[in-house]
Amino acid sequence: MRKLWWWLPVVVMLSACRKDTVGEGPEAGTEGGQTVARLEGEAVAGPDGDGPYTVTKAKLDAYVGYQRKMLEVYGSLMRGLQDMGPLMDAGTPKALEAARSGLKLIERKAQAETDARTAAGLTTDEVNRIAEVVTTVISQRQMGRTLQYEEELKKLEALQARMPAEQQQELAPQVESMRREVDAFQMLPEARREFGDANVDVVLTREADLTKNYQDMLKAFAGVRH
């Protein structure tokens, strides 16, 4: 799950649609190829093919803005595809027109993504490299909050404190194990080993905004209207 991109469900869907309906062009050999590599779990190489990518504060700020723009694009796209669903399922004479509209939506999505990236001053490679760090950090932090390990640890420690000394010792390994889990979600040791302390720390400076974007994108995938 470590390399699951924050836009992965839409990328999978749209990559398939464009491959089947739009045909192969210059974009299919570049960005499309990178998408395949990401889905297979392959690390995205930098411009020179090696070395760690440094996420600067300026690049991260630009990426946060890029995410917000793409949220609008994906939200509009998902709503459009949902609206076409009944027509396609019903097999009415409007089905062909609905299919054409779907292709237009996909084409507009591709252009909107390019426009958002250009407006943010980011290259495709930069978006991919920043997304890798951001997704790993934010998804792990979000999982920690979802599992509520910190709250469970507090309850376990309170229970331990009320026990006789002998039972406290028996419970100690479980408390220590839970404490390690909490520390892992708070300190993110795996992400730090993979991306470096500096990259993780700079992402955490925008944790609130990036978490909101993460949650809003999940809602967009689910077709929740804001």
Image (cartoon, grey):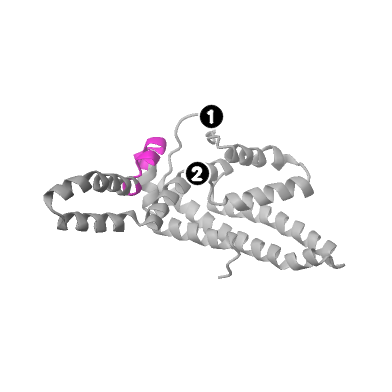
Residue numbers of the magenta segment:
185-198
Q: Amino acid at mark 1?
A: Gly
Comparing labels 1 and 2, the label whose residue is closer to the camera = 2
Q: Amino acid at mark 2?
A: Met
Identify the element where label 1 is drawn.
loop
Neighbourhood count class around disc 2 (C-alpha, 10 Å): few under 14, some 14–19, many 20 upward = few
On screen, residue 43 above or below 66:
above
Q: Is 41 in front, or is 43?
A: 41
Nearer-N-terminus badge (1/2)? 2
On screen, residue 47 above or below 97:
above
Q: Residue furthest left?
A: 165
Asked if residue 69 lies left or right of residue 106, the reply is left
Q: Evaluate whether residue 175 shows in this view.
A: yes
Task: Report x, y in % for residue 28.
Answer: 71, 41
Neighbourhood count class around disc 1 (C-alpha, 10 Å): few under 14, some 14–19, many 20 upward = few
Q: Residue at x 25, y 58 (%)?
A: 155
As for residue 211 lying within the magenta part, the answer is: no
Q: Which mark is residue 151?
A: none
Q: Residue at x 58, y 67 (%)?
A: 224
Residue placed under numbered mark 2 in the picture: 1
As for residue 192 lying within the magenta part, the answer is: yes
Q: Is 181 in front, or is 46?
A: 181
Asked if residue 158 lies left or right of residue 211, the reply is left
Identify the element where label 2 is drawn.
loop
Residue placed under numbered mark 1 in the picture: 49
Task: Report x, y in % for residue 112.
Answer: 64, 56
Q: CA distance from mark 1 to mark 2?
A: 24 Å
Q: Evaluate whether residue 59 shows in this view.
A: no
On screen, residue 171 above or below 70:
above
Q: Taken as a whole, is the magenta stretch helix, strand or loop? A: helix
Q: Quadrant of the C terminus?
A: bottom right
